[in-house]
Image: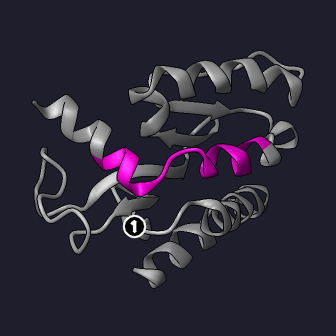
Amino acid sequence: MQANIENYIAQLPEERQVVLQKMRTILQENLPEGFAEDFAYGSIAYVVPHSIYPKGYHCDVKQALPFVSIASQKNFVALYHMGIYMDKNLYDWFVLEYPKHVKSKLDMGKSCIRFKKMSEIPYNLIATLATKMTCETWISLYSEQLK
């Protein structure tokens, strides 16, 4: 897994390597205890491992439960955060905070935050976002949606 992540980063243009490595470090340092780093769906992922949530991801129970991932896409770097998608309060907080950190308009889908300008990535905001949801809270939100 570690080799897959290192290989993934190494094949990117240098500017993207720097960005993904910085985002990776921020997530490693700020995500609450319980989340594990993985390489899934072609991206660097932070998941709830089967040792904590044995049911796994409902779409493929062999996969750990995804929470956050980062990826280099064709025209942007993406941060996928399932907590923002599932928790309206977290979503609202992020949307209100974003303009305090970045002058450009927020480019966001349901769980995908797209960063087209590498120089405008709000690393401090990403660090704070990473701390906002525990593994237990994520499992609870996810489980409720499956019912």
Q: Position of residue 41 (x, y in %)?
A: 33, 54
For the C terminus, give its image quadrant.
top left
Residue shown at the point (67%, 68%) measured from the top left: 29
Classify 133 as above or below 34. Answer: above
Residue 30 lies in what quarter of the image? bottom right
User: Along the horizontal axis of the image, is 18 left or right of 4?
Assistant: right
For residue 100: magenta?
A: no
Q: Position of residue 56 (x, y in %)?
A: 17, 58
Q: Position of residue 6 (x, y in %)?
A: 55, 78
Residue 9 lies in what quarter of the image? bottom right
Q: What residue is disc 1 on?
A: 39
User: Along the horizontal axis of the image, is 16 left or right of 131?
Assistant: right
Classify 93 as above or below 19. Answer: above
Residue shown at the point (20%, 40%) measured from the top left: 143
Classify 110 as above or below 81. Answer: above
In magenta, the rendered stretch is 125-139
For the N terminus, give its image quadrant.
bottom left
Residue 50 lies in what quarter of the image? bottom left
47 or 42, nearer to the observer: 47
Q: Magenta region's main secondary structure?
A: helix
Residue shown at the point (29%, 48%) measured from the top left: 139
